[in-house]
Image (tube, rainbow, N blue to C red):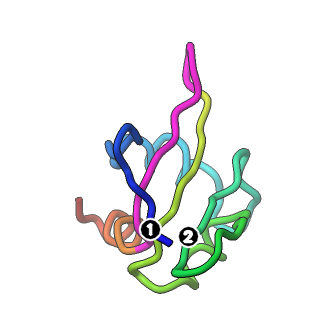
Amino acid sequence: MKVIPTGLRKDLKPFFNQHVLSIPTSERQASPFLVVDEETVMKCNNVDELLEYSDDIEVLQTWPGAKRSDVFYFKVSDLKEHMKGGK
């Protein structure tokens, strides 16, 4: 199974800073992560859980905006890189 990211948000730096990493990594996210591997889609509730997946795993998370909800797309490697100070 592969996510086709057309139309999904990929501007990750502000998303990671303002939403994902503004909550302690062990606490439940307001909106769960949807983790996509080769055969399944799984729900993941916090960043610590998410970081246990391999780098190439695709992730979707819906986050409410001011006038609409947005779906963000990234890979676990993108989050790890951001947490190290990259991207």
Q: What amino acid type should be assigned to the residue bearing mark 1?
A: Lys
Range drawn in magenta: 65-76
| Mark number, residue 2 | 1
Residue, x 76% and y 58% (percent of image)? 28
Q: Position of residue 62 (x, y in %)?
A: 60, 42
Position of 12 compared to 3: left or right?
left
Q: Element under label 2?
A: strand
Category of crowding for the residue at label 2, using alpha-carbon neighbours closer than 10 angstroms: few (below 14), some (14–19), many (at least 20)? some
Q: Position of residue 49 (x, y in %)?
A: 66, 76
Position of 58 compared to 6: left or right?
right
The residue that mark 2 highlights is 36
37 versus 9 height, above or below:
below
Residue, x 35% and y 66% (percent of image)? 78
Q: Residue 21: within the magenta? A: no
9 versus 33 height, above or below:
above
Q: What amino acid type should be assigned to the residue bearing mark 2?
A: Val
Residues 50 and 36: in front is 36
Q: Say which of marks 1 and 2 sits in front.
A: 1
Q: Element under label 1?
A: loop
Quadrant showing the C terminus? bottom left
Q: Residue 67: within the magenta? A: yes
Tell me which numbered mark, 1 or 2, is placed earlier along the sequence. 1
Residue, x 70% and y 47% (percent of image)? 31
| Mark number, residue 20 | none
Category of crowding for the residue at label 1, using alpha-carbon neighbours closer than 10 angstroms: few (below 14), some (14–19), many (at least 20)? few
Gap in angstroms between the C-alphas marked 1 and 2: 7 Å
Residue 67 picture quarter: top right
C-beta proximity under 8 Å, tags 1 and 2: yes
